[in-house]
Image: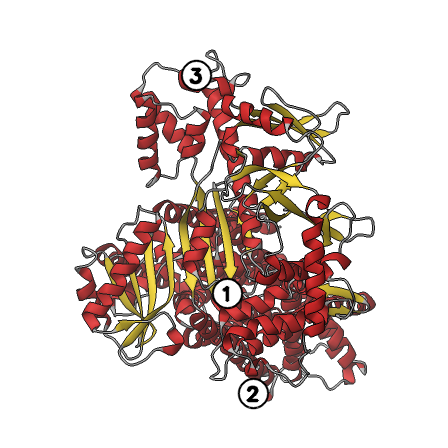
């Protein structure tokens, strides 16, 4: 085998990297286990607040040493293979930045009735429209103010230099859109700062491209009300005077001496002490004190506290980021806080700076406050404009303009603080604290310093948060309780192990030693997938596990194709080594084409999908790449090692009973194509007819609304609960069993267009009250402690109407783009439009068949939701079906080139017969794992697995009876010419 050394080298390197990145996961699990041990009481119950406090306390502390390099727990978490919310519990929130206040702010909040009417109409229209708010506002403005220009409203003193009475409407709209985009960026940065201090490990925040939405995931968040308040609160910008160290140094010295004295008087707990012996009120405090002593680099008996010994500058309280936990621990102690002056509060800087030695330093600013009030000397709403500019030395700076009231206060504040610092504070974080060079009389200021261009732009954007607030509202929300997450985790693991075991047994039974080679490749494949996911910092979700389970079945495909080719060569009397070489060589193009087409569908899913679909797409793409490398190249190395004795080697690629199985078939498939067309059409028409009459069950992410997963201590009949809840929700409610007879899913579209907190609370309250009234049960918060006649909400989700419309639109777009991409790829590879069109017709057939199957299943009482995960299943079916079809097409192309005097119809029939063994075996192995998913994957993946089961079955059927026969029907001219004895053009 050529390049064997390269393959071995790459395998060793990839394996080493995977081991390295997966080691962080093991370390992280160890730290979390310690947190669980610490937070578990004598009864075995975990206090999640204590668990979070423990993890937060070690967040910036070294917990892993690899070859001399220390990694903090934060760095470990950033590198580990994390678990998605559906596997560990937490909150998924999509926020939409409201542009209403931006438009009003730019206009100066005018009293003009027509302007305010247009804003109100646009706000109402935005509830059910996906159009931009600015466009909706302009449409309403033109309707309410025919012939009147926007400049009549927006040409204000604050906008001088940007907007005049001569400025066109289009230019004003561009300015508004730019400010809205800046507001979204500003909100993103503010929210990122907020969630970083929220107290959850590994939070995730990202902007959704092409929209004004921000998506946030908070693993382990169990206080939903706190999260909502934190995320939806309007940022407060303030200007404060800064005290220097010499003005409060006496208080720091007092804290230092008191701390040292306390340490000398404290008896250090012995190693035998456990948190279980501590009183409930003291356990957290004492445990963290122990930890403080352990991580403090100084001897407790020394004469200085960490507050002084860890300082990194002589001008103020500047510390290494890793030491902030220790500093906070001391300064938040009620005993030490009493020594600080009442007119002082301490605030951290928002962003660390790099020191010469590479460490990250953070300053703790001493803010001067007025006794008895929390009012800042100057609030941020006086800032009318802020822009990135250049100072006199052409370095990035920020220009800031204030209104008349702000200019007056700013003049007074700067005149009193010449030579001193004034802090710009947002959300209790100091963004900058420039020194005042002189009195600023006119409200026009320039902030300069060692800014990069990006930092100056960010600061200018932050300064606008006062005059242009950007309120955020939750338009999509999903809450998964720890109980539901643990259950999903167990279901995923069971599915993966069961699927793997069944495939291993079949492959070894059917392909003997060849099966063992395929299994070795499969193990490498799964290992590589997990390692690469860890390297990319991607969280493993339940759909991601489904992707791995599916990859288990699909990764076998390449080896089945190779082994069937080898068996074919052996049956033709070719020697072992030559058969192996021919098998790998002849199967390569078909394997490549099949993997590329499936990878294309994964890439489209990732680009256009949202939420769980993206997680599935990532795993699918990584799985396909790893599968191709392991199945084609690693197995080749293994087979080469097993055949050192050449043709006398003992390796075999089939069990005795399978040696000639499916090898001598001569079925005339094409003669039965019209019967196949009729059967497929009949089933599809029947299913679509049922769908039209009864409708399909769409999930919340397609229809919008709210859903709640409710656990009871005993079975509850869904129909009885629905009847009772109909009165609460005016009939807009559905109730169904969710995985177990004592768990129900309640879905309602009540108040679907309202996203405010009051509406959310009203709907949840109605659900609780309705269930309590119908069943007589009592609601409890903790699902793990359900008692007699009690129920609890273990998970919930909310999707706004406009978000649902976006999801539907992106799903349809994904389907169309996938079909176009596959059409073009097939055309590129096979050089005939008939092959492309035949494959697309087969894929449309498969898609319609799956939809019809859902409708028929619902008629028999088995209802599956059509949601984002269903779309992922359809696109997976498309990728799988085209893979099957490409294998047949590839053999047709090979046989046409070597057909001699054989007619085209016979060539097509022979090609189907020759690939039938591979088609059936691959479908069987994949169906094994799909059936495992169907029965053990849990309720979340039930519809996904059912769609795959139908899709793979019908995909196998369509590659034989639809795709290839369609190509034959589309090539009538060539067939007629052939019948007339004329020469025909061969397929390229």
Q: Position of residue 75 (x, y in %)?
A: 68, 61
Residue at the spot of label 2 = 657
The reply to whether residue 895 is in sight is no
Q: Is residue 12 above or below residue 394?
A: below
Snapshot quadrant of residue 856:
bottom left
Q: Which residue is mark 3?
A: 151
Extreme residue in the top direction: 166
Q: Which part of the image, by quadrant, shows the N terminus? A: bottom right
Q: Which mark is residue 749?
A: none
**Mark 2: secondary structure:** helix
Picture coordinates of residue 2, whole percent (x, y): 81, 66
278, above or below 816, in the image: below
Residue behind mark 1: 220
Q: What element does badge 1 sit on?
A: loop
Other-residue count near label 2 (Cα within 10 Å), few / some / many at <14 / 14–19 / ≥20: few
Where residue 940 sits in the image (x, y, percent)?
41, 67
795 or 239: nearer the viewer: 239
Q: Residues within 10 Å of mark 1 (few under 14, many from 20)?
A: many
- The answer for how far apart the CA atoms under marks 1 and 2 are is 53 Å
Of residues 931 and 645, the one nearer the viewer is: 931
Real-space CA distance between mark 1 and mark 3, rounded to the nearest whole angstrom: 49 Å
The residue depicted at 43 percent of the width and 35 percent of the height is 99
Give SS at disc 3.
helix
Marked residue nearer the N-terminal end (1 or 3): 3
Left/right of residue 112 with respect to residue 406 in the rendered view: left
Q: Residue at x 40, y 47 (%)?
A: 803
């Amino acid at each position: 085998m050529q390049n064997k050394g390269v393959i071995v080298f790459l395998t060793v390197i990839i394996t080493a990297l995977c081991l390295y990145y997966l080691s962080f996961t093991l370390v992280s699990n160890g730290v979390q286990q310690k947190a669980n041990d610490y937070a578990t009481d004598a009864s075995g119950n975990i206090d999640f607040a204590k668990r979070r406090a423990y993890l937060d306390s070690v967040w910036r502390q070294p917990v892993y040493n690899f070859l001399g390099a220390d990694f903090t727990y934060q760095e470990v978490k950033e590198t580990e293979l994390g678990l998605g919310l559906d596997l560990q519990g937490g909150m998924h929130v999509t926020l939409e930045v409201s542009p209403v206040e931006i438009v009003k702010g730019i206009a100066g909040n005018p009293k003009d009735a027509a302007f305010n009417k247009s804003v109100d109409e646009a706000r109402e229209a935005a509830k059910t429209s996906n159009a931009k708010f600015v466009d909706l506002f302009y449409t309403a403005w033109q309707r309410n103010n025919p012939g009147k220009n926007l400049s009549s409203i927006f040409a204000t003193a604050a906008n001088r230099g940007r907007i005049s009475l001569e400025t066109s409407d289009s230019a004003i709209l561009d300015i508004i859109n730019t400010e809205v985009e800046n507001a979204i960026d500003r909100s993103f940065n503010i929210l990122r700062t907020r969630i970083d201090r929220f107290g959850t490990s590994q939070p995730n925040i990202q902007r959704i491209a092409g929209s004004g939405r921000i998506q946030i995931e908070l693993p382990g968040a169990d206080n939903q009300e706190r999260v909502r308040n934190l995320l939806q609160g309007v940022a407060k910008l303030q200007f404060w005077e800064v005290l220097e160290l010499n003005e409060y140094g006496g208080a720091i010295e007092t804290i230092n001496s008191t701390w040292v004295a306390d340490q000398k008087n404290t008896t250090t707990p012995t190693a035998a002490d456990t948190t279980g012996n501590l009183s409930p009120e003291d356990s957290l405090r004492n445990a963290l004190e122990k930890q403080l002593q352990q991580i403090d680099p100084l001897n407790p008996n020394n004469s200085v506290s960490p507050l002084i010994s860890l300082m990194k500058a002589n001008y103020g309280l500047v510390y290494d980021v890793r030491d902030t936990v220790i500093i906070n621990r001391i300064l938040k102690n009620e005993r030490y806080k009493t020594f600080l002056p009442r007119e002082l509060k301490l605030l951290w800087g928002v962003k660390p700076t790099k020191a010469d030695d590479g460490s990250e330093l953070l300053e703790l600013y001493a803010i001067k406050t007025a006794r008895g009030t929390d009012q800042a000397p100057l609030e941020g709403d006086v800032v009318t404009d802020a822009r990135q500019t250049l100072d006199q030395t052409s370095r990035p700076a920020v220009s800031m303009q204030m209104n008349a009231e702000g200019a007056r206060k700013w003049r007074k504040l700067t005149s009193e603080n010449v030579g001193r610092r004034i802090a710009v504070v947002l959300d209790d974080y100091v963004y900058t604290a420039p020194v005042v060079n002189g009195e600023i009389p006119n409200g026009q200021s320039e902030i300069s310093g060692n800014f990069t261009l990006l930092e100056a732009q960010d600061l200018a954007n932050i300064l606008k948060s006062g005059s242009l607030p950007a309120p955020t509202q939750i338009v999509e929300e999903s809450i998964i309780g720890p109980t539901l997450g643990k259950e999903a985790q167990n279901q995923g693991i069971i599915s993966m192990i069961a699927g793997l075991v069944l495939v291993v047994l079949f492959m070894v039974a059917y392909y003997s030693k060849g099966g063992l080679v395929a299994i070795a490749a499969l193990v490498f494949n799964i290992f590589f997938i997990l390692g690469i996911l860890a390297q990319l910092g991607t969280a493993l979700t339940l759909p991601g596990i489904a992707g791995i389970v599916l990859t288990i079945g699909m990764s076998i495909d390449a080896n089945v194709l190779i082994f069937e080719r080898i068996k074919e060569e052996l049956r033709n009397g070719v020697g072992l080594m030559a058969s192996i070489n021919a098998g790998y060589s002849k199967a390569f193009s078909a394997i490549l084409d099949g993997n590329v087409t499936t990878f294309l569908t994964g890439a489209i899913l990732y680009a256009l999908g949202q939420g769980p679909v993206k997680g599935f797409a990532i795993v699918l793409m990584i799985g396909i790449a790893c599968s191709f490398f392991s199945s084609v190249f690693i197995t080749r190395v293994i087979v080469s090692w097993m055949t050192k004795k050449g043709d006398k080697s003992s390796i075999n690629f089939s069990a005795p009973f399978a040696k000639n199985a499916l090898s001598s078939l001569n079925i005339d498939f094409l003669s039965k194509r019209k019967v196949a067309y009729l059967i497929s059409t009949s089933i599809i028409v029947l299913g679509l007819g049922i769908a039209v009459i009864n409708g399909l069950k769409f999930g919340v992410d397609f229809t919008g609304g709210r859903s709640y997963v409710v656990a009871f201590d005993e079975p509850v009949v869904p129909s009885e609960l629905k009847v009772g809840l109909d009165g609460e929700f005016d009939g807009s409610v559905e109730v169904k069993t969710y995985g177990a007879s004592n768990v129900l899913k309640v879905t309602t579209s009540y108040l679907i267009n309202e996203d405010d907190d009051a509406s959310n609370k009203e709907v949840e309250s109605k659900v609780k009250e309705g269930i309590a009234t119908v069943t007589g049960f009592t609601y409890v918060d903790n699902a793990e402690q359900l008692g007699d006649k009690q129920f609890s909400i273990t998970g919930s989700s909310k999707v706004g109407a406009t978000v649902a419309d976006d999801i539907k639109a992106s799903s349809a777009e994904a389907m169309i783009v996938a079909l176009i991409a596959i059409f073009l790829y097939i055309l590129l590879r096979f050089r005939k439009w008939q092959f492309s069109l035949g494959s697309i017709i087969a894929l449309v057939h498969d898609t319609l068949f799956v939809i019809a199957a859902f409708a028929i299943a619902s008629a028999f009482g088995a209802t599956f939701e059509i949601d984002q995960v269903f779309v992922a299943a359809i696109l997976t079916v498309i990728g799988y079906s085209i893979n099957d079809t490409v294998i047949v097409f590839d053999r047709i192309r090979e046989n046409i080139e070597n057909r001699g005097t054989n007619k085209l119809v016979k060539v097509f029939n022979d090609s189907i017969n020759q690939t039938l063994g591979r088609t059936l075996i691959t479908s069987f192995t994949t169906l094994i794992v799909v059936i495992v998913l169907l029965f053990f994957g849990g309720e979340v993946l039930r519809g996904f697995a059912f769609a795959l089961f139908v899709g793979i079955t019908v995909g196998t059927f369509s590659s034989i009876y639809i795709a290839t026969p369609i190509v034959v029907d589309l090539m009538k001219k060539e067939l007629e010419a052939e019948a007339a004895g004329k020469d025909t053009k061969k397929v390229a």
